[in-house]
Image (spheres, rainbow, N blue to C red):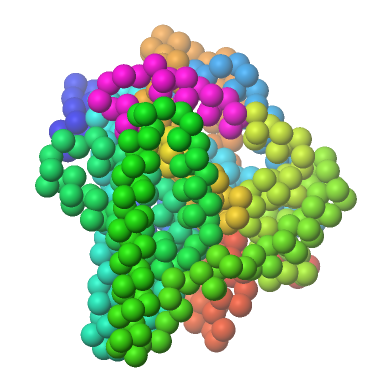
Amino acid sequence: MAPFFYCFIGQDWSMSVLVATIITFFLFVAPLFDLTPGLTWHDQQRTLQVASILLSAIGLWINRHLLPVFSFKVHILVGLFFLLGVLSASLSKYPLWSFVEVFLFGGVFIVGLFAYTLTSNCSRQLVLWVMVLLSCVAALLALRFVSSVLAAFYFKADLYPDAVINGFDNVRWFGQFQALSLPVFAGLIAYTGRPLMKWGLFITLVSLWVSAIAIGNRGVWASMIAVGLLFVCLGKDYRQWLKWQLAAVTVAMSLVWFCFIYLAGEFGILGDGMGTSRDLATSSNRLDIWGYTLKGILSAPLFGAGPMGFASNYVFRVAHPHNSVLQIAYEWGIPALLVCFWLFLLFVLSVYKRIRLDSGRLHLVYVSLFAAILAVMADSLVSGVIVMPYSQLWLAVLVGVLASELKMGRAVNCSYRYPIRVKALFQISVCLSCLFLGGVILRDLPTLYPYELRPGKGGDAPRFWSQGSIHGAEGVSR
């Protein structure tokens, strides 16, 4: 941990260390330990996400003299996006929950900005510790999966992916985390020069791929194929990352066939093989959902139905359209979607230019983080990445860390001062986000227990909470 604490030597950042440590703890325990008996994993992760947002706001206040300065274009686009969100929320049918979504997106931005500020004033090795944290969580989840499979064979229990995945209420949400972690593992394997560590990481990567194939999650396959095809065209450095992925997936597919099909048949264990018949071979009604979403976009193209507005639909039992592009257009409006495209394009081009210029040993690390971000965004085209709390939190951290490592913003010294109106507006926005989200947690958390214990859990679609549909005159969401 020396590289992490080295950045604080000689500086009055003891509170920053504490804040970063607590957020690290939240990221580690959120899918691994049941801290809130009676709550679903989704609700626990949402609560810890809001706590991380509040802590990040404290961290930004502590380091307010070290906030980076981005280009004028970026400032305008970010401000315009949230302005459009506020206008859309004001015009929505359920403005209370629409503003919850706006402030939640603002909170995710706060976490990313805190990660940027913290990383920009630390050793460059800090990015490795973030990747190690992500890898440790993924490794423990993979170990839990393998132990559950072994237990199923030992006790001759039914071998279904839903029964051997723990830490997430839905295997697709676990797939979102896999889309983040698979590229990072390949990067760490290529980065390390120790044979024992390299083989240990490779075995863990194979275990993750076994779980991904067994689940049959379409988002993982779509994201990894998209990133793989992109990296084939980018050069030999990127192909090195791809070789490790291909080796791992080849071994994993053999193990899945041997364990889930051959051995399961020999032992007489029931299961659904690789899970492809359940997920990959069907659209899970997504085409109908996307058609409905497109009609909603055409009916309100400028400001949409309001953030979180899809959760109020009575046509489908889903609270989001399982496509980030359609979701932003339907809920926030087409202008907000265009702003998102512009910001994402600026980020991708900036990262790619700086990665091409970097020739140090950390080059593959940056490539892997870049791949993880691209993979999870590809996954968001068929899933709810931008809705699920744990995915949102990790995505904010990775974007902030990578942007800081590649110097996408200009660091400022203590003598620099933002314009007073800009500074005041930012501080007010941060305070409103914290107060609003904190108020929702305090209001709803005591009432979540009976709802999660009722029969037929999961009948209501998840959004902010696991029972996430907006219904009734007051727009109550559970």
The residue at the point 31 percent across, 44 percent down is 244
Residue 153 visible (yes or no):
yes
Viewer-side residue, 139 vs 224 = 224
Does residue 247 appear to the left or right of 301 in the view shown?
left
Q: Quadrant of residue 68?
A: top left
Does residue 130 appear to the left or right of 282 in the view shown?
left
Residue 112 visible (yes or no):
no
Relative to 416, residue 261 above or below: below
Viewer-side residue, 137 vs 4 = 137
The residue at the point 68 percent across, 58 percent down is 321
Please identify the residue farthest to the top as the structure is shown.
415
The quadrant of the rendering that contains the C terminus is: bottom right
Q: Position of residue 56 (x, y in %)?
A: 42, 40
Is the stretch drawn in magenta largely helix, strand or loop?
helix
The residue at the point 18 percent across, 49 percent down is 199
Would residue 283 be counted in the magenta stretch? no
* Residue bounds of the magenta highlight: 343-366
Q: Position of residue 448 (x, y in %)?
A: 52, 72
The quadrant of the rendering that contains the N terminus is: top left
Relative to 436, residue 208 above or below: below
Does residue 63 appear to the left or right of 446 in the view shown?
left
The residue at the point 36 percent across, 62 percent down is 253
Relative to 399, residue 417 above or below: above
Viewer-side residue, 422 vs 20 = 20
Q: Position of residue 188 (x, y in %)?
A: 27, 40
Q: How many numbered marks appear? A: 0
Would residue 357 be counted in the magenta stretch? yes
